[in-house]
Image (cartoon, rainbow, N blue to C red):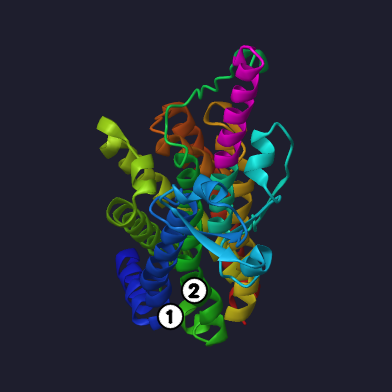
Amino acid sequence: MLRNIYLKEMKDCFRDRRTLLLTVFLPIVMMTGLIFFYENMVSDGEGEVYKLALDESVTSEEKALFSSLENIEIIESTNPEEAFRNGEAQAALLLEENFISTVEAGGSASVTVVGDSFSQNSANLMNIVMNTLSGFEKSIISERLQVEGMNPELVQPFTIEQKEVSEEDPNIGLIAMLIPMMLALSIGIGAGPAASDLFAGEKEKKTMEALLMTPVNRNTLLFSKWLTISTIGSITGLITLIVVAVEIQFLTENLKNAVSFGDDMGLIIGIAVVISIIYAMFIASLLMLTSIIGKTIKESQSYSTPIMMLAMFPVMIIASVGINELSFHHFAIPILNLFSLLKELLFGIINYEHLLITLASNLICMVIVFVIGRILFLKDKWVMN
């Protein structure tokens, strides 16, 4: 009986175009857009050609500081700052009159770099200009010290070397936030419509009374509906993981170079799939509860919206936590533990203790929420509209 009801509910869900759209097509479109957005965000601008606005009065020597760079195109203008504001260039450089000659004569000159740090292209160009000017400044200082018969090392008494504990690509941290967030959102978005329709929808359509009159045990009915929601959420999660993995592998360069699991790839992917399914079951329990409480689909969706929003908070919490700083509570709190464990896996770390804590906490919370839902479902007050 359980199998028959489960198959019936699955067929009904996938006959609904809305469910099919939210389960299959929306995750693909959403994941594709986010993948390309983050790939562009981590791009260092290699291969890009930037336009730098300079005053028409600059000398050939001043222009040569930047014209020798392959990725900079000089735009001469009577008003460089105005040219930048009009979108003719990504940044503008304002040099004091006779800049080179003043500096070479031992004087001091001013330079102003005009740009927009909120624009990636403008920020990249400003970094290039500042690095070029910094190199030029060091060469001038070195020449002046040599003329005075002094050792240039006097102005650099020590050198600083920064060493990263992790040898991973820096972009892996971005992926460690991106994939869990996409997974959590897609599971919630995929399972939400099915959950609302299977309980609140039945009450709204006045079919729940007829369903309860059949010789089917309420526990069997409840479990089959919960299993349907869990299955749809799991399918959405698996589609998300597949889409993300394929697009990172074949459509990106920077994100692809950041991910490297080595010989543990199969095990890491397997653990990620198991965690996704357990998380889908936990979310299914929460969505089932909101649907039982709601009298209509709209009311049920209103109750389930905060659950969807919960997936955004772990991003802010985990983003500033190092992989070696993750502790017990990061894996004991549901939803947060999904982000924590996937972050470890993406860094190539397999910690079975953390895995067991995550599985146990999700299963315990899932059972508690499911029992609450069962108590409500056994009362006619909550299942009759």
Position of residue 249 measured from the top left corner of the image (x, y, whole percent): 29, 51
Q: Which residues are magenta?
A: 131-152
Tell me, yes or no, whether the two marked residues, 2 and 1, touch with CB atoms within 8 Å.
Answer: yes
- Which residue is at 60% across, 55% downward? 58
- Give the left or right position of residue 98, taking residue 284 as reference: right
Side of 354 where 87 appears, left or right = right
Q: Amino acid at mark 1?
A: Arg
Does residue 369 sit above or below 325 in this rendering? below
Looking at the rendered structure, which numbered label has been put on residue 263? none
Q: Main secondary structure of the magenta part?
A: helix
- Where residue 375 appears, x then y in whole percent? 60, 60
Q: Where on the picture, by quarter, is residue 204?
A: bottom right
Q: Amino acid at mark 2?
A: Pro
**Quadrant (top left, top right, bottom left, bottom right) of the N terminus:** bottom left
Q: What number of labels is visible?
A: 2
Closer-to-camera residue (226/191) = 191
Q: Position of residue 102 (x, y in %)?
A: 69, 40
Q: Is residue 127 above or below residue 208?
A: above
Disc 1 target residue? 18
Element at label 2: helix
